[in-house]
Image: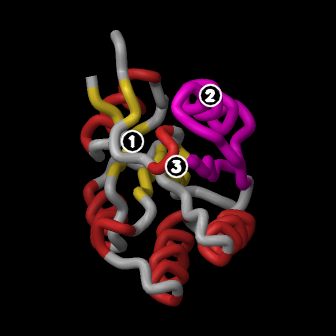
Amino acid sequence: MNLTIAGIRGGFMKILIVDDDFICRNLLLEIAKPYGKCEIAVSGNEAIQAVETALHRKEPYDVIFLDIVLPEMDGQMVLRNIREAERKYGIRGLDSEKVIMTTMLEDYENIKRAFSEQCEGYLIKPITREKVIKQFQDLDLLSR
């Protein structure tokens, strides 16, 4: 399968992977690294700091994989803080960073809450290459 990165400045995505689980984090890293420069955060506070630093440098992430179950604060709260930081920098709507929630939580309430906080995707673990590629394609980040 020949995939190309679509609509990304420089043709290479900037990706943040937020997960406190070593295995999940490294699996996502292996899947995503052919498509962009990947950075990692292991907690909600680290994720918010990474996003604010990127926004301050005018180098926002193209994609953020955000686990819901994190130490310090859950991914739903992190997502809310990411959207607040974007608004502070004048970033809204389609210009915002694409957030894909990753979780073992498949219940309707978590899914509804994530989308109401403005995530763009929701992946149920276990994460596979196929699921990630489909999310990238659904968000028009990859084309065939």
Question: Which residue is found at the position 26% from the left and 56% from the top?
Answer: 108
Q: Tell me the element at label 1.
A: strand
Q: Earlier in the sequence, mark 2 or mark 1?
A: 2
* Distance between mark 2 and mark 1 Cα atoms: 14 Å
Residue 134 magenta-drawn? no
Which amino acid type corresponds to the residue marked 1 in the rendered image? Leu
- Residues in magenta, as a range: 14-41
CB contact under 8 Å: marks 1 and 3: yes
Above/below status of 46 relative to 86 = above
Which labelled disc corresponds to residue 123?
A: 1
* Left or right relative to 59: residue 39: right
For mark 2, does the 10 Å Cα neighbourhood hold few (<14), some (14 to 19), or many (20 or more) residues?
some
Can you say which quadrant of the picture contains the C terminus? Answer: top left
Q: Which residue is mark 2?
A: 27
* Distance between mark 1 and mark 3 Cα atoms: 9 Å
Residue 33 magenta-drawn? yes
What percent of the width, then of the height, locates residue 14?
A: 57, 48
Question: Which residue is found at the position 42% from the left and 47% from the top?
Answer: 8
What percent of the width, then of the height, locates residue 90?
A: 44, 85
Above/below status of 128 relative to 60 = above
Q: Tell me the element at label 3.
A: strand
Above/below status of 89 relative to 58 = below
Query: From this viewpoint, is residue 49 visible?
Result: yes
Query: From this viewpoint, is residue 44 visible?
Result: no
Which amino acid type corresponds to the residue marked 3 in the rendered image? Phe
* Distance between mark 2 and mark 3 Cα atoms: 12 Å
Question: Which residue is found at the position 34% from the left and 50% from the top?
Answer: 121
Which amino acid type corresponds to the residue marked 2 in the rendered image? Leu
Q: Which residue is mark 3?
A: 65
What percent of the width, then of the height, locates residue 65?
A: 52, 49
